[in-house]
Image: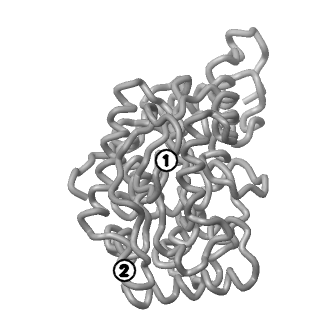
Amino acid sequence: MGKSVDIPAVDGVAIEAATARQNSLTKPQGSLGRLEDLAVQLAGIQATERPNVDRKWIIVAAGDHGVTAQGVSAFPAEVTPQMVANFLGGGAAINVLSRMVGAEVMIVDCGVAGEIPGPTDALVRRSQGRGTADFTAGPAMSLEQADAAIDAGVAIAGELAEKGAQLIAPGEMGIGNSTSAAAITAVMTGADVSTVAGRGTGIDDEGLERKIDAINRGIARNKPSSEDPRGVLSAVGGFEIGFIAGLMLGAASHRIAIVLDGYIATSAALIAAQIDPAVTGYMIGGHRSVEPGHTIALDHLGLRPLLELDMRLGEGSGAALAMSIIDAAVNLHNGMATFAEASVSNRDE
């Protein structure tokens, strides 16, 4: 990546203070389970005893993938620009969910191949090209394009920090992107391709065989190494995946918490974590998708997702739902009375 980022360690003093507060609230210690852990993690991220997540953003990054030429998706590539138009018009699932959780939405063109229909005034354009190349025939993108995609994400994170963002969820849209996600996951975790490639948009058995074969051929041809995350992105990635990786790195550098969505966003997290492992301290696993490789990627990152709803939509939809859980954790942490404040007897020491 061209632009370096400095990710601070999560704040240990704030974690201790938040833990002490949790232990003094009017409840048995640990009785709110992972909600307590979330509040304490956010305290460490924001370096304050009482974190706040009122300013939430969902960033949907869109890009096309040349590997769709290998018949790896049930939908044609034309769906990508059509869905971007739907996002801009407010008619997609992520628009409904973002309104529900009080999050603002940003739609970013990272490399959509076709023309996006309808009004596009609200579209943020950070395109690195009209879709990636077919990675079965060579690298998906150049190293320069990979760096530019990551840098674009870092820059957008800076803009969100200036707007006061406290919690972000990177989402995505791109026909063929689960193929890139599976290829990245196979390389970064060492898992066999057959265990990380799923049905994506709903391909049949023959489609899944084509998908596995395409990934194996792409890895064999490009020979990416897990020690070189930029090289992995260049070899088999997507422009939107590189953007999301940069967005995560940039967010962490500004002490903004990151809710992971599904498989594609988590594959970007694998890239980001290899660039700077400190970024994982800022990540919250939003949900577990039905894509088999998602669990493998989450385990590799050491993340336990908050929800398991058999989803595989993308767009940031699972992360948006998780935001409501995060809201609850923070509100309980900040709003409950302590034993002393409520004049309630604490347990005997």
Q: Is residue 37 left or right of residue 247?
A: right
Q: Which residue is mark 2?
A: 225
Work out whether residue 19 or residue 234 is closer to the camera in this orientation and state it.
Answer: 234
Answer with left or right where residue 172 lies relative to residue 35.
left
Snapshot quadrant of residue 229? bottom left
Q: Pick the residue in front: 22 or 83.
A: 83
x then y, percent, for residue 124: 40, 39
Q: Write the residue at 30% across / 42% down.
A: 155
Amino acid under label 2?
Answer: Ser
Compared with 78, 93 (above or below) is above
Q: Position of residue 99 (x, y in %)?
A: 66, 28
Image quadrant in which the N terminus is located: bottom left
Question: The C terminus appears in which quarter of the rendering?
Answer: top right
Q: Secondary structure at mark 1?
A: loop
Which of the marked residues, 1 or 2, is nearer the chain's N terminus? 1
Give the distance between the C-alpha atoms of the residues marked 1 and 2, in whole angstroms: 35 Å
Which of discs 1 and 2 lies nearer the camera? The answer is: 1
Q: Is residue 10 above or below residue 13?
A: below
Quarter of the image where one finds residue 47: top left
Q: Which residue matches tag 1?
A: 116
Secondary structure of residue under mark 2? loop
Kind of residue at badge 1: Ile
Taking 35 as reference, is 272 left or right?
Answer: left
Residue 15 visible at all: no
